[in-house]
């Protein structure tokens, strides 16, 4: 039987124990001929070997989610590969996380590739996995300007509205009671102050002749499920301009009584991003109305700090760091993860924090904005917890 103290050992404690044991073993080996070493009488039984602590890079079950259990659920974005029978990823998810998001499997092109025909199987399998492993599910996403088949934009404005509302009604009804929140509208805010600002000049904006499609989406989602939390989700809320535009839109939705429960902050950040800027994004919405929630929906920390041109036209991107994460960058990243999670835990209206992936090899940032190995998450390519994991789960861990 394992005693409680053993269960509470952190990964670092185990490492310390391990180092201690290795040191002891080395001392014993060196001292073999010394006068003070216990020499067994010839033919006698040698003294018992010192106890060997667990040799494992596996943290105690539940450490990650339990560290934040009074603050927020901890999620990861995943696909079918991560839940395959017997996969190490499935094991990590079930032991360390409390929430999942479908990285792609609940987007319109995955759920309704042709009009009126739903392909729910892969998403249903994710949800079944979640339910079998006590994980909650965050829904992503009902409306986006990407990952949406062309048929959504065919016909008159009224036809487009009716089709969108039917799609949202069908999907929200299908998953009713099995997801705790939906990103109803994703990335509807403009990146600059162009003519359609604060709204993105998108296929949806053009099809609806303005931003009304946002209302249509929220109203259909609320009508289909009165209980699920409805979110508007976007990136770059750590940047003042984007944040201000999102604030304008959220204030307008609230003023007009559009059913909205919260703001999703993607938080695809770079090592150069300060935690204070991420917190400013969250705090801009705190107290906007009673009960409004913030979610961190897609957190990852790129080890590159690229200029805007890298995202705009793939120029000026930082060169690859190679096939191993340099120690200095790992430490810098761990520091940022620690700052973020401790600030997240201090914000009571932040109720969900999701990482955009589980292990570094599976991150979308290995091919976005350019092909280049990236290391943005808290589990490495060998499925071992990284320094960043230790930094957020053990306040005494020295980075
Ligand atoms: C990304 C996925 O990670 C990729 O696998 C896919 O090819 C494109 O979409 N913002 C979002 C997410 O809201 O849905 C995106 O996910 C990343 C940016």
Image (cartoon, rainbow, N blue to C red):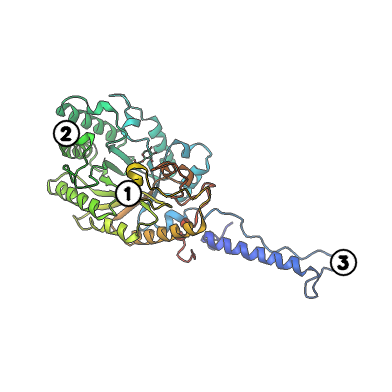
Does 24 appear above or below 284? below
Instruction: Mark 2 vs mark 1: give the one in front.
Output: 1
Looking at the picture, tell me which residue is in the foreground, 139 or 199: 199
Q: Label 1 belongs to which residue?
A: 308
Does 31 appear above or below 334? below
Does 61 appear above or below 37? above
Q: Secondary structure at mark 2?
A: helix
Between the C-alphas of marks 3 and 1, the distance is 74 Å
Circles 3 and 1 in contact, beta carbons < 8 Å: no
Looking at the picture, tell me which residue is in the foreground, 86 or 305: 305
Between the C-alphas of marks 2 and 1, the distance is 30 Å
Q: Quadrant of ligand 1?
A: top left
Q: Label 3 belongs to which residue?
A: 42
Residue 29 in percent (x, y) is at 75, 65
Residue 65 in percent (x, y) is at 42, 54
Circles 2 and 3 in contact, beta carbons < 8 Å: no
Residue 32 is drawn in which quadrant? bottom right
The residue sitting at 35% across, 54% down in the picture is 72
Instruction: Mark 2 vs mark 3: give the one in front.
Output: 2
Mark 1, Cα crowd under 10 Å, few <14 / some 14-19 / many 20+, is few
Looking at the picture, tell me which residue is in the foreground, 334 or 113: 334
Between the C-alphas of marks 2 and 3, the distance is 92 Å
Residue 210 in percent (x, y) is at 15, 37
Q: Is residue 128 left or right of residue 253?
A: right
Q: Label 2 belongs to which residue?
A: 208
Answer whether residue 359 is visible to the viewer in this image. no
Answer whether residue 356 is visible to the viewer in this image. yes
User: Reading the chain from its start, which is encountered first: label 2 or label 1?
Assistant: 2
Q: Secondary structure at mark 3?
A: loop
Residue 147 in percent (x, y) is at 32, 34
């Amino acid at each position: 039987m394992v005693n409680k103290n053993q269960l509470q050992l952190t990964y670092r404690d185990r490492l310390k124990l391990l180092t201690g044991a290795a040191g002891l073993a080395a001392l014993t080996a060196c001292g073999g001929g010394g006068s003070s070493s216990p020499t067994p009488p010839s033919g006698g039984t040698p003294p018992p070997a010192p106890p060997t602590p667990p040799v494992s890079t596996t943290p105690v079950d539940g450490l990650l989610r339990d560290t934040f259990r009074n603050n927020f659920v901890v999620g990861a974005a995943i696909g079918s590969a991560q839940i395959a029978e017997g996969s190490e990823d499935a094991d990590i998810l079930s032991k360390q996380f409390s929430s999942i998001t479908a990285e792609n499997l609940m987007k319109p092109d995955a759920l309704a590739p042709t009009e009126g025909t739903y392909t729910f199987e892969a998403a249903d399998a994710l949800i079944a996995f979640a339910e079998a492993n006590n994980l909650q599910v965050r829904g992503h996403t009902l409306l986006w300007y990407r990952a949406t088949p062309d048929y959504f934009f065919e016909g008159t404005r009224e036809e487009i509205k009716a089709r969108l509302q039917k799609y949202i009604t069908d999907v929200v009804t299908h998953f009713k009671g099995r997801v705790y929140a939906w990103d109803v509208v994703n990335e509807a805010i403009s990146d600059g102050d162009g003519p359609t600002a604060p709204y993105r000049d998108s296929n949806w904006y053009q099809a609806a002749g303005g931003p009304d499609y946002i209302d249509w989406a929220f109203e259909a989602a609320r009508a289909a499920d009165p209980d699920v939390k409805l979110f508007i989700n976007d990136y770059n809320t750590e940047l003042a301009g984007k944040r201000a535009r999102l604030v304008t839109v959220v204030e307008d939705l609230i003023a007009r009584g559009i059913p909205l429960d919260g703001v999703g902050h993607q938080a695809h950040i770079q090592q150069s991003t300060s935690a204070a800027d991420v917190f400013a994004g969250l705090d801009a919405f705190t107290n906007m109305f009673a009960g409004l929630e913030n979610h961190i929906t897609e957190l990852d920390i790129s080890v590159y700090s690229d200029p805007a041109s890298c995202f705009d036209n793939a120029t000026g991107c930082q060169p690859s760091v190679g096939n191993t994460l340099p120690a200095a960058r790992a430490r810098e990243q761990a520091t940022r993860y620690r700052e973020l999670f401790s600030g997240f835990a201090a914000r009571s209206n932040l109720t969900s924090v999701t990482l955009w992936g589980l292990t570094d090899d599976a991150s979308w940032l290995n091919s976005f904005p350019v092909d280049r190995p990236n290391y943005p998450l808290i589990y490495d390519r060998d499925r071992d917890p990284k320094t960043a994991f230790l930094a957020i789960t053990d306040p005494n861990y020295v980075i």
